[in-house]
Image: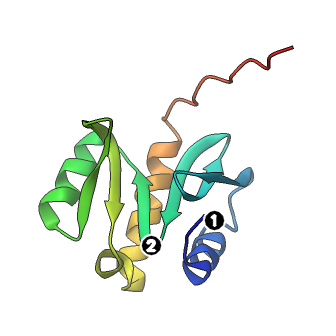
Amino acid sequence: MAFDESLADRIREALVNQKNVTEKSMFQGLCFMVDDKMCVCIRDLELMCRIAPEQAEAELEKGNCRPMIHNGKTIKGYIFVDEEGYKNPKDFKRLIDLCLDFNKVAKASKKKKKKG
């Protein structure tokens, strides 16, 4: 699992006032779940932000990020932001706020049934 620990600490600090935050190893990095829904993740030095699809399009136009592509398909509402895109504290806060705003309306993934 490769991720920047200082970036993880920045996210922990940004999410300190959220009630239900958990951390989970996902996507070859660390994912922060808010209310049991994926909110923001870290892989290497990139942030993976789960935001409103229309907001993701606007962010992609600004640069410093790329779409999430899985099995050759672009996944709407997920972007990877490089270090230049979040190193400024205002940009970092804006991205985290976008993730938290979308988290309020995002659907949780279906729970996998345990084999028994």
Kindly give the residue lying farthest to the right in the view shown: 116
Q: Is residue 25 above or below residue 76?
A: below
Q: How many numbered marks, from 0 up?
A: 2
Q: Is residue 44 left or right of residue 112?
A: left
Give the mark nearer the N terminus: 1 vs 2. 1
Q: Is residue 35 left or right of residue 98?
A: right
Residue at image position (42%, 84%) is: 89
Name the residue beneath numbered marker 2.
93
Residue at image position (29%, 38%) is: 76
**Mark 1 crowdedness (10 Å alpha carbons): few <14, some 14-19, many ≥20:** some
Kindly give the residue lying farthest to the left in the view shown: 61
Per the rendering, the mark at residue 36 is none
In the picture, the quarter occupied by the C terminus is: top right
| Amino acid at pointer 1 | Leu
Question: Which sits in the foreground, 27 or 85?
Answer: 27
| Amino acid at pointer 2 | Lys
Name the secondary structure under disc 1: loop
Instruction: Give coordinates of residue 39: x percent, y percent.
Output: 53, 50
Instruction: Give coordinates of residue 93: x percent, y percent.
Output: 44, 72
**Mark 2 crowdedness (10 Å alpha carbons): few <14, some 14-19, many ≥20:** some
Instruction: Give coordinates of residue 59: x percent, y percent.
Output: 22, 59
In the picture, the quarter occupied by the N terminus is: bottom right
Task: Choose top left, top right, bottom left or bottom right for residue 37.
Answer: top right
Residue at image position (36%, 85%) is: 88
Name the residue beneath numbered marker 1.
15
Q: Are marks 1 and 2 in contact (CB under 8 Å)?
A: no
Instruction: Give coordinates of residue 8: x percent, y percent.
Output: 60, 73
Q: Is residue 60 above or below residue 54?
A: below
Name the secondary structure under disc 2: helix
Question: Which sits in the foreground, 109 or 58?
Answer: 109
User: How far separated are the C-alphas under marks 1 and 2?
Assistant: 10 Å
Q: Is residue 47 left or right of residue 41?
A: left
